[in-house]
Each structure stands twice: as C-alpha cells, then as structure tokens.
Image (spheres, coloured by chain):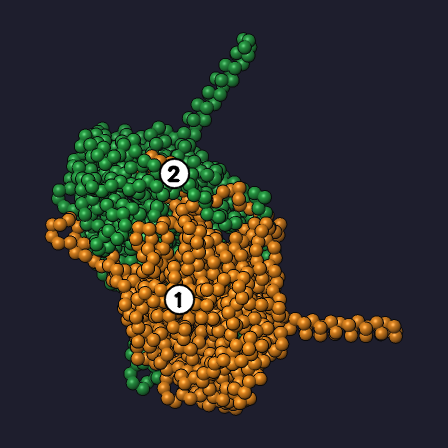
Chain colours: A orange, B green
Amino acid sequence: MDFTTYLRFLFILTGSLLLVLFVRTWVRLPSQAKVELDCSEYGSWCTFKNSVSGSSNGVFIQKGKPKPQQKVDHEKEVAKHPLDPLTVQEIKKVQKIVQQSSIFNHGKFTLHSVVLEEPPKEQVLLWKAGSSLPSRKAEIIAWANGHAYKLIVDLASGKIVDNQISHENGYPAMTMEDMTSAVKVPLKSKQFLEIIGKRGVNVSDLSCLPISLGWFGADEEGRRLIKVQCYSSAGTANFYMRPIEGLTVLVDMDSNEVLKITDKGKDIPLPKAEGTDYRLSAQKYPLLPPLNPISIEQPKGPSFKVDGHQVKWGSWEFHLKPDPRAGVIISQAAIKDPDTGKLRRVLYKGFTSELFVPYMDPSDAWYFKTYMDAGEYGFGLTAMSLDPLNDCPRNAYYMDGVMASADGAPYVRPNMVCIFERYEGDIAWRHTECPISGMEIREVRPKVTLVARMAASVANYDYIVDWEFQTDGLIRIKVGLSGILMIKGTKYENVNQIRSQDELHGTLLAQNIIGVIHDHYVTFYLDMDVDGTDNSFVQVKMAKQTVKNGQTPRKSFWKAERHVAQTEKDAQIKLSLYQPSEFHVINPSKKTKIGNPVGYKVVPGGTAASLLDHNDPPQLRGAFTNNQIWVTPYNKSEEWAGGLYVYQSKGDDTLSVWSNRNRNIEKKDIVLWYTLGFHHLPCQEDYPIMPTVSSSFDLKPTNFFESNPILRTAPNYEKDLPTCAALSE
Amino acid sequence: MDFTTYLRFLFILTGSLLLVLFVRTWVRLPSQAKVELDCSEYGSWCTFKNSVSGSSNGVFIQKGKPKPQQKVDHEKEVAKHPLDPLTVQEIKKVQKIVQQSSIFNHGKFTLHSVVLEEPPKEQVLLWKAGSSLPSRKAEIIAWANGHAYKLIVDLASGKIVDNQISHENGYPAMTMEDMTSAVKVPLKSKQFLEIIGKRGVNVSDLSCLPISLGWFGADEEGRRLIKVQCYSSAGTANFYMRPIEGLTVLVDMDSNEVLKITDKGKDIPLPKAEGTDYRLSAQKYPLLPPLNPISIEQPKGPSFKVDGHQVKWGSWEFHLKPDPRAGVIISQAAIKDPDTGKLRRVLYKGFTSELFVPYMDPSDAWYFKTYMDAGEYGFGLTAMSLDPLNDCPRNAYYMDGVMASADGAPYVRPNMVCIFERYEGDIAWRHTECPISGMEIREVRPKVTLVARMAASVANYDYIVDWEFQTDGLIRIKVGLSGILMIKGTKYENVNQIRSQDELHGTLLAQNIIGVIHDHYVTFYLDMDVDGTDNSFVQVKMAKQTVKNGQTPRKSFWKAERHVAQTEKDAQIKLSLYQPSEFHVINPSKKTKIGNPVGYKVVPGGTAASLLDHNDPPQLRGAFTNNQIWVTPYNKSEEWAGGLYVYQSKGDDTLSVWSNRNRNIEKKDIVLWYTLGFHHLPCQEDYPIMPTVSSSFDLKPTNFFESNPILRTAPNYEKDLPTCAALSE
C-alpha cells in the first residue's frame, strides 16, 4: 500500500483503539476481576439468544403501546427508598472506607457480603415518599486474620460505626472467588494429577466443584475447608454426568492447600459423554416438532409500575430487591382495601432464608453433601441473568442486581429478577346458575396475577423462586427445581447386575450413572405485619367431635377450635393430614365490622419432612426443618434460619435454637417461618437435565377483608383483546 | 296499499314464516321440554357476553391464522370412534326403542341416564382408525314401577339385549326434572305457605333447592326422598345468602307429596339482600380499576387437532367425551416416545368418579348435607356452558355435550368442555452455568401445556375440573372450587354476641349469616395402562436408616424400598408426611434399556383426609375417602366409587367394599383411585362469592422414558412471536 493509505490506516487504527479504550473505561465497572466472576452486562458471559435492551432498573410506566424497557445507568443510580439496595456509588464508597480503615491492621481481607444495613423497622414505617431517607448504612461480612467480622459502615460520615468479631463456630458464606480458586487447588497436587491421569481424564477436560462439607466433628474445625470433586467435560458441556467417582480433595480455602486426597473410586469407570449434553447446539437427533408460537400479550403494556425497587400493581404495592444471600427480598407488601381505598399492611419482609439439601448416601464421597445454598453459596450470588422469552414471558420487566465482589468492588448482574403479569386462562371466581333455579346467570372473572421471579444456579441445581401476587390478596410463594442432578459413578451398566436396588442410594439412570437420593428444604422468613406490627398466631384446629347417642342422626363432625399461641413452642408446627389445622396470623386489636379478627393464613402446599435423626450432624445444622411452621418474635439478628455464619457451623445458631427459648409471641411483632420440602428419588426422565418440579405455599387473606375483594371486577370482553399477527409470516 | 303490494306483502310474509318454520324444525331438537331444562344452544339460557360461533364439535385443524371454530350439526353427527358418545340420532333411536318396548309394562318411566355402553376394552384396543366401529350400544338407567333398571340397547338390531332390575339399596342419580319438580312440591302445602308467610317471604321470591338426604336409617328407606329448603331471592340473584333457616320439607320424589315439614328456625331472621349480589349488573360501587388487557395469543393458531372427540397435541393423543355423570371422560391417553416415535399407552380411562361433600353441623336442618355430586346430581348434567374469554382463554376450542333428558330426548349443551394450550410464562427445564465452571451456558425451555376443562355448577357450588397434559408426559388433574357457600341463618349480628365461636359450626360472615364448615372430596378413577394392560402397583417407601456407630460420620439417611402390592389391601394408602412413599404403577414386563421397570407415579398434591367416624352413615357411604389411594383390579362394574346407585344408598357398593375383597392386583389390569380433599372453614372473603381455591395431583412418567423426553425442544425466539395491536384503540 502507498504512504497515504498507510497513514489513513494508522489513523483509523489509532482512532478505533482510542474508541475501544474510551468505551471500556466508560462502561466498565472498576474491578477488573469481575469479567471472569460474573455475568456482567458488558461481558461475553451474557450472550442472550434474544437480545433485550440490556440492563435496566428505571421508571417503568406503560401507557399506550409497550415501549422498550428504559435502561438504568447504574453508575448514576441513587437510592430512593429506605430499603433500596446499595448502589454502585455506595458500594464504591464502602470499599474505599474499608480499604482505608485500620480495622484489619491493613492485612489481607475479603468482603463476603456488602449489603444495605436496613434502617430500624420503625423508621422505615414512618418514612414517606418524597421525604429524605434515613441514614444509609452498609452491613459488611468480612474475613480477615482468620476471623469473621460484621461491620456497620455509615455512608454519610464514612465511619465504621460497629465492628463485631464473630465467636460463632461457623464461617461466612463463600465468595465467588473462594469457589473459583478452591477448584484450582487440586491441580497443585502431584498425587491428584496422577489419579486423574489413571482415570483417563486430561487436565484440560477437568471441571471441579467446590462442595461445602457441612460439619462432622472436631477434626474439621478451626479452619475454612472445602471438598473438591472433579468431573470430565470431555465430549459434553454436562460434565456433571461424568464424575471421577470417589475422588475427594480436602482443601484449605485460606491457604489454598490440599490437605487430604481420598480416592474410593479407583475401579469405577467414567460414564460416557454420549447423550448427556443438553445444549440446543449439541442435539444430534432432529428436534421434536415444535408447537405453534404462543405468547402472553398485553398490547397496552403491563398494568404495573416499577419505580426503582417499588412495584405497584392492581391493589398491591411492595418493595423488591435482589440480595446476594436471599436472592430476592420482598418488603412492605401492602394491599389497598377495595372498600376504603386505604393501603393495608400484610408482609413487612419476606425472603428465602435458607435451603437444606441433604443427600442420602452415607459413603465417603457423599455423606457430607448436605448443602445450605443460601448461607454457604449465596442464593443471590448464584442467581444468574434470566433468559428473556424463556425464563420469563415476553411481557416481563427485568431488574438488575448490584452486588459487591470479594474486594468490595461493585458489579451488576443484569436481568437478575423479572416481573410480569400472568394470565394462564384460569378463573378468579365464577358461578353459573343451573336449571334448578331457572335463573339465567353466568358470571365469570378471569384470573390475572403478578409474578416476581429469580433463578439461582447453585452449581448443578437450578432453583426458580416465584413470588406471585393475586388480586384477591393471596400471595403464592413457589419454588421450582430444575437443572442437573448430582451424579454418582458406578460399575453397574444395567439394573439386572444389582443385587438389591435399595442399596444403590439412588436410581440407575444410564450406564455407570446413579442419580443419588436427596431432599430439598427451602425455608422462608415471613415477617407478617397484618394491619400493623403486633400480631398473634392462631392455630385453628379441626377437632373431630363425636355425637352422643340420639342427639342427631350424625355420629361425627369436626369443629374449628381456635388456639392462640402464647409462646414459641405453641407455634412449632408439624403438619398432619389426620390432625389438620389452619394457621392464622391475626391482628388481635383489629376486627372486621362483624367482629372477626383480621388475619392472613399460611396455606401449606405439597411438602416433605426431613427423615434424618435429630442428632445427626446435618440435621442439627438443618434443625430449622424440624417443623414446617415456626413463629418467633421479631428480632433483628434472627433472619437466617441456619445462622448468620452457617458455613461449617454446628447448628448452635439455628431457628430451632432461637425458638426453643420459648419467648412470648402473643400480640407481638412476629415472624412466621415456613419450609417447603421435596423428597427426590431420581428417575430416568431427570437425565441428563430435569424437567421442572414445583411446590408452593400461600399466604391468604382470612377475614382480612369484609368480603370478596374482587367482587367488583369486570369480565374480559372481546373488544379489549388484541389483534395479533404472526411475526415470521 | 294496492292489491299488487298487498299480494307481494302476503308472499313475503308467507315466505318468511315458512323460512322461520323450516329453520326451527331443522335446527331445533325434538323435545320441547328442553328449553326450560337446559342451556340449549337455541334457548335464551345461553346468553354469552362474548358471542362465539356457537355449538361446535368438528374437525379443528388450524393452519395459518386462526379461523372461527367450525360449527357441528349435531343432527347429522355420526360416531367415528368406538368410545364416541351417543349422537343425537342414536339417542333418538334409543328413545324410540325404549318407548316401544314392553319392558316397563307400558307404564310411566323416566330415563336417568342414557350413555354409550362402551365396547369391551379388548375390542377398543384392537380397533384401528378407519375400520368399522364395534357394535354401538346404549346403557340406560331407568326408573319405573318403583324399580331401577339397567338396560343395554343394541342400536343396530334395535333390541334391548340386557335388562337388570336393581336390588341395591340406592337409587339412580336424580334427573334434572326430578330436581326442578321437587322444588315446587312444598308450594302445595298450606303449612309451608303459612310458615314462609310468617317469615316474610313472598311466594314469588321463593327459590328452593333439592337437597339429597344421604341415608340415616330405616325410616328413610324404600322410597325416593328429597329434602327441600328454601331461600328468598327478594333483592338479590344470590338467594343462597337469604336462607329461610331451619325449614326443611321432606318430599317424595315419585308421588310429589310433602311428607313432613320441620321448622327449627322460627326466630332466625332472613339475612339482608344488600351486598350479596355478585352479578356485574348489580354492582353499585364503582368497579375496581381494571388491569390492562392480557391474553394468550397464538397467531398461527393452536397446535392441537380435534377430530370428533379425538385430540392430538404435541406427542399426546387422547379421546375426550362429555358425560352426564362424570362430567368429562378421558380415554386412551397415549404419548409418542421421542426416541422411537411410537405411541405408548398411559391411561385407558380417567374421570371424576364421585364427590363427597359432608357438612359439619349436626343440627336438624344440616346433619344430612353430605352430598355426592356425581351420583346424586350428575357432575356432567350440572356442567353448564362455559363462558368464552372468562372460563377459558381466547385461544380455546369448545366441545358440546349431547345428552338425554328424562323422556329420552336428546339435547345439546353447547361449549360444555373447552380445550386450550396454556402458556403461563413457566419453565419446562433450565440450566445456567454459574461462574464456578467458567462455561457460558444458559439453556432454558418454556413450558406449554394442553388443558381440557369443564365447570359444574351443582346448585351453589362451582367445580372447575382441568386435565392438563404436559409435553414431558406429566398429566396434572386439578379441581378448582368457586361459586357460592351453603349459608346458615343465625340470630347473631356480631361475633361479640357469640359465647364460643367453635359452637358456631362455621364462621359469621355477615350479619345473620354463617358459612358452615364442610369438606370436599373428589375421587378420580384412573385405569392406568402403562405400556400395556397388565401393570403392578409399587409403593416405594422412603425408609429411614440409622447408621451403626463409626461406619460413616452420618447417623441417618433414607433409602428407597420397593414393595410390589400383591393384593388390594396392600394398596390401601393413607398418606403420611412422616412415613413418605412414592406410588408407582409399573409395567413389570417392560423395562428401560438399563433395566428399570417402565412406570408412571401418582404424585399427591395438597389434600385432606375425612375426619368422620368410619361408622358414621355419611362416611359409610363416602368410604371411598377412607384412603387417599386405592388400587383395584379392572372390573367393568366398578366405576363409581360410591356405587352405581348412590342416591340414598347405605354404602354397601363402594370402592371400600370392593377393595376389601382383597383381590390380587399384581401383573393385572389395574385401576388406580386418587382422592383430592379440601377442608373448608369459610372466611369473609368467601362472601358473597368465593375466589377459586384449587388443588391437584399428577400422573408423572417415572422411568417411562429413557431420558428427559423434552430434551430436544427449542427455546422461544423473538422472531416467532406475534405482533399485536390493541383492538379497542
């Protein structure tokens, strides 16, 4: 090329480089470590099949036709509500304050959690929109010098106003950095490399998982440990199906040392890769014939408004925020009374407090698998960006999460939560007169709900958590399980080789693959504030009555006996099909016009109870699942059912321990705890990826309203519905 | 007018009259009695808010954009499948055969049921599309000369080929004519008229209900009785809220005589009409602010095909027919295996076999209220036409019911069943890799299902029954309860007047109104044919295991113990949260490639168990609710869990009686029975009409497929979704 062309080329090249640099500086969040750690909106991590307008968090008020969602500039975002999560700027400030403080003697430290320290409940309740916010504080869980610290930072003054060194047995939840570095540690060990070599796995195909080890006695105390188990990803993205069975590497998470290698699976072959990959791109057979396109359509846009983290829909208002530990926190849910137009409080705060996932195989490589996904891994930390059109319908609004990485730098998890109106063709209420009365009446109202959703991928498993709000005041909390099973390698290739299937601790799902039996318990914290702070818990027993001879031709019936719980032990509830009850949270000082105490009831759905011994170490730690329902008096420090420091804890700071103090709970600010449960005996349909299984429970108004709150709603009319054309035609 | 004009006028008039006559003759069904009895497509009964193309039953194959549903000419309709219900012409023929036979000595008779006598199962299974149908037969339940008859009519020969006089204690289900005439009988009684006069109710405002009286001893045997209770419809369409409390009229249904009047409610005032009317037209307050229109849209039309009563959708095929007793019967549900493309049998026949609704008030006017809605009232007989856009979404297809009235004349219940594809924004399966593995994977598949729905209005209560088919092979059977409570009048106007609320037998819902405690049990007949006729029932017990000291750090776990039920008593299952099991129906002679027996499991959802004494007369009759699960060997005559003749029966022909014969059920053609249950303690939100409460259970493939059958499905893409515009803008 000639000189002019050369110059022109140089000029364009320099310009481009400058532009790239500028864009990177401008849009990139400060910590360079994030790209590999998170699904940042700017990283290649977030390759959507269906691009959306990207990160967002703004005012979302739809009038007329739907507009693309307004993008939020998280760098400029400011808190608008006392409960709004820390912003990017606030997290940066916190980072600086901690870095500059001498609190850790300027030694190495990691931040395991940086979240808003919520203002006292009284302050939040008094706050009114438009007035200034209560002072903004951050709560930090840090790890330094072999100790866990809980710090409170005042953002205005820039000071650390509280500093507690933990004396608990447990440790903070792992950081993503803990997990990603732990899985690299085995590679330092020659012995490990030898073993995987013998098993025929190349280092380049190695995928390892950081497995929390629970707590099983004094040997494992005094240091942050993790067990690393590895898989081969040769030939499949679904490495979970190719375990190097029986190989467990005990690692010190702080020194990054291999402490012990156990190999109990020498003779167990690596299962085949064939048929395990679930990605669309990996499907060799033709796809199944597709169904015609189907969509939830709202031609005039959604009926809800999102302003920052405040959501308004129909009669409902609530605050929603992503949280690194809980996933999603719902606060101040209140509903407008259709008679008075006044907003009435229902739930001050609700979230996934803890999960407990014990596996049912007592062998060396399995006995310790008794995960607590919120307090060990971070249920929000592992909640990845949702996939538009697939994780949530087309009419969804997406909210980003803003969190801090281990060095305190903020990062954005785009589309961490979605909010959408659901219409599934169901009926809110109906009545037809049949010919008996001769009246020609058919009155039917369709059912539309609002769903807030997140999906956590705690390594192999995917948990979908829905908070669904109904127009009639009901709140349904649903957990869906999908993702990939924890697989055990085996010599067996066919069930006919197995002497007794029940010694398998699971099901043979494919050649050399056992899906191991396990349970899932998901415990929810529900700070109920039914029409005010002070509430009581009433167990309404359905008590069987026997009729004395001759009084009536009936011999039996049941009546509703109301028992107001005085203390916590009165409210330790084990559900029973044969001694059923309703469970009401009432406001004893407020009655309906005709005199019933206003209330909400918790309606259990399909659930499961833990079958473990109460003295088994995992069950000591998961003792919060000993009952399906508990009620405790509100106590700021009692939010995490397994304890604040749950990692390697002994179970001495659980809901069970708190509740056994048997405090008074009548006419108090009370917190209801409910545990959803699933027993999972895997079946072949769960291989290589599991169809979603769901379970839910409800919070349902019970004499809360004077009458059916959705009586005065209109039916659907043809004239209101959209005209649609196929896009691809 | 001049003569020509006059002639022209006459000509046009005559022509018009002839046309009207012709149209009437052509489209009207023969029996004139029907217009008042049923929601005939031609009667004013069916005033839809949203007109549809009316009655329909045709081939529904959508290509390109949705077309209006093709109308079925029921007069010309012919059966295409061995299980197709009797057609209008066939019912007419049956009517003629019965009328002309001497079987009842030419005395008065009523037909309580005229349905297809299904061909033997072997014949149906052998039949292939296109080949000629097995001989068409009708099964008739008739009442004549004080006896119940079960007749089988051969349609080809026109002969009654079987004729059984019942020796059972019970009677046939009521006809709609029984019900509508019984409620008029009290008016013949002066005493009755005096009483209602004293209570301040005008005859013109009287609405009475025919209340089945169960069975409580010898006094009530030997004749068809009914108890009539009345209400005032003055000022409200919701007369159920204005009971003339305590007034019960015992009526002989055959002689139409008043046998006894009991009045135990002299001092109980009639509750107010105010606030009770639920009709849109009756709402005085402004309506609640509406949500923006929302709809399930399928611009290319549904993916299912309906040919007569055969439904094909995705991998599923099944036969669906309306039935006067069961409501809806699903037959021959089979699913295509994604690996082989072969259709595999799952369910030969499934339907709502019986309902049991005991009230929990032992007083004179209430103790006997222990309804069996299928066998006493007819769950299909009371299934009214669905309301398009409200009972079912816009993308629904409607199927009519063709039934016979008491004189044997056919009539059409338009839109008795709807079928639609549901997309509710849920997830069929998903997995995201979190940063631990460093893989950038997010694979999510949306969930679309097919729903077949009916809604029965058994007087006050509305039951919505959904059969939902999932692409992954799961069948969800869901029952929703809505409609209006059975109300008890009371003197109380405020809870503070009541000494002990638990003596109320319910909840004070408004002034003078008690919502009485009751239960609902809905028992399903499920003739499972998993990959063939001969199946076994396996209880997979989750058996707690204790670890002997030192073997492993764990102290406990559970293992799956498979117990194959040998006889019926092995399969009388009482669910327990603390001794949990899975319940599999397997085909013992067919295994997956790796050796698991192919199976389906029944997955209980939220349920309830009856608290009544097993010796209480209602529970003797409702003994089919003594267990949640039963398994019986297939027996043609065991279809109705409470007995074929359940009205006033003593409970000597129930599922419980059959099952206690303890027949062998291993490797047999077996029928699974599952009972959904609801305890209902009413609350003010249920007044004056109840928001829907639902419960469901699942039939779920369990080692039926080799692997996840929906692995090879594609996600949603923006390009496939519709563009929609608001219709009213």
Residue A720 is at least partly visible in this image: yes
Res. A349 image quadrant: bottom left
Residue B363, position as x, y percentages in the image? 18, 47
Taking depth in this image into account, of B413 and A145 the one nearest to the observer is A145
Residue B203 figure quarter = top left
Quadrant of the rendered structure where residue A404 is? bottom right
Residue at the (44%, 56%) spot, across then down: A343
Image point 62% across, 70% down: which residue? A75
Q: Quadrant of the C terminus of chain B?
A: top right
Residue situated in front as seen by the camera: A708 or A389: A708
- x, y percentage for residue A547? 15, 54
Residue that extends furthest to the top in the rendered view of this protein: B3
**Chain that bears disc 2:** A
Q: Earlier in the sequence, mark 2 or mark 1?
A: 2
Quarter of the N terminus of chain B within the rendering: top right
Image height of B372 relative to A620, above or below = above
From the viewer's perspective, tell me whether residue B460 is left or right of residue B188.
Answer: right
Tell me if I can see residue A49 in this picture. no
Provide the residue designation for mark 1.
A527
Residue A472: image x %, image y %? 41, 53
Residue annotated with mark 2: A441
Helix, strand or loop at mark 1: strand
